Amino acid sequence: MAGLVDIKELIRTIPDYPKAGILFRDITTLIADPTGLRATVDALTLPYVSAHIDLVVGIEARGFIIGGAVAYGLGKGFVPIRKKGKLPARTIDQAYDLEYGVDTIEMHADAIREGDRVLLVDDLIATGGTATAATALIRRSGGHLVSAAFVVDLPDFGGAEKLRGLDVDVHTLVDFEGH
């Protein structure tokens, strides 16, 4: 179905959000469209049907929407990676750099077992800060990161290349040039 739907055309661009000069790529219009949502989930699921994935990990918050659907499509469990302080059980955390400061993400310490084969899913990769931190969490927990899949790549920010430099296979559906 992905070939029948122009996923890129369904993604709204919002200028000057969250600050002046930024073109925000908003997938809420894509996931509100039933055909667009199905095409997106199919396009992120099909490459991994035979990949022996044990778990899908999604990054807060839009990665929960897409990642949960991908996990369902693969018949696998789902693990959330959240902002610090949002998970109730014992966690492991990873700090990462922001443009102006540092943030931290975390996941439950027992969410991934040694040797679990993991697919990381999020809506968008820009600088790769959050995805790199998620990669570190997955690997520290003993998981094997099979691939990272994103709806949108912003290649001018270099995040996908940064992940590839960490020996992560990266799969994206559409890209938008510029900032």
Image (cartoon, rainbow, N blue to C red):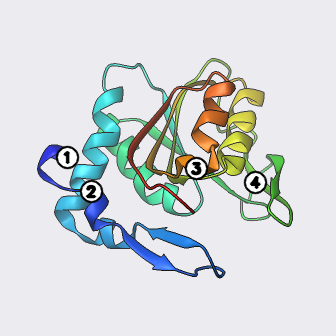
Please give the label number shown on residue 156: 3
Q: Mark 2 sits on what residue?
A: 7
Q: CA distance from mark 2 to mark 3?
A: 20 Å
- Secondary structure found at label 4: strand
CB of mark 4 within 8 Å of CB of mark 3?
A: no
Instruction: Name the amino acid type tagged 3.
Output: Asp
CB of mark 2 within 8 Å of CB of mark 4?
A: no
Position above or below: 109 against 147: below
- The earlier-in-sequence mark between 4 and 3 is 4
Instruction: Name the amino acid type tagged 4.
Output: Ile
Instruction: Name the amino acid type tagged 1.
Output: Ala
Apparent side of residue 88 relative to residue 2 in the rendered image (left or right): right
CB of mark 2 within 8 Å of CB of mark 1?
A: yes
Q: Nearer the viewer, residue 78 or 66?
A: 66
The picture places residue 2, in percent across and down from the top left corner, at 19, 46
* One can see residue 80 in this view: no
Q: Residue at x 31, y 26 (%)?
A: 49
Quadrant of the rendered structure where residue 52 is?
top left
Q: Mark 1 sits on what residue?
A: 2
Q: Residue at x 47, y 55 (%)?
A: 177
- The earlier-in-sequence mark between 2 and 4 is 2
Q: Residue at x 27, y 56 (%)?
A: 7
Please give the label number shown on residue 65: none
Q: Mark 4 sits on what residue?
A: 105
Disc 3 crowd rating (10 Å Cα; few below 14, some 14-19, many 20+) is: some
The picture places residue 157, in percent across and down from the top left corner, at 63, 50
Apparent side of residue 69 relative to residue 95 in the rendered image (left or right): left
- The earlier-in-sequence mark between 1 and 4 is 1
Q: Residue at x 53, y 59 (%)?
A: 178
Select label 1 or label 4 by which is in front: 1
